[in-house]
Amino acid sequence: MKTRKSIIKRFKITKTGKILRRPTGQDHYRAKKSGKKIRQTRKWIPLSKAEAKLIKRYLYY
């Protein structure tokens, strides 16, 4: 099976095996959002266990 390249581009895998993603809502309509909200979307956040299980299925290599 091949690795899904779209998954590789969107997620980051830590050394311990956790899968991280970027928060949503950072591409457009930023003028109406507060500075706090914009700063919070820069950070990587961990996936839930159920979501991580699905994503790991597509990461073969």
Image (cartoon, grey):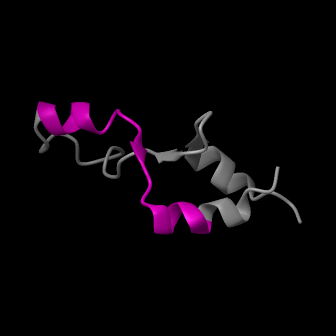
- In the figure, 35 relative to 41: above or below? above
- Residue at image position (86%, 61%) is 2
- Toward the viewer: 17 or 7? 17
60 over 12 or under it: above or below: below
Q: Which residues are magenta?
A: 35-54
Task: Please indicate whether residue 35 sits to the left or right of residue 12 in the image.
Answer: left
Q: Nearer the viewer, residue 24 or 19?
A: 19
Q: Quadrant of residue 41?
A: top left
Where's residue 11, x and y in %?
Answer: 57, 47
Q: Which residue sits furthest front?
A: 16
Residues 24 and 17: in front is 17
What residue appears at the point 24 percent right and 36 percent down from the top-left corner? 40
Main secondary-structure element of the magenta-colored stretch: helix
Task: Give left or right: position of 37 versus 53.
Answer: left
Query: Residue 53's spot in the image, x, y percent?
Result: 58, 65
At a point 23% along the width and 48% down the height, the residue shown is 29
Q: Quadrant of residue 42?
A: top left
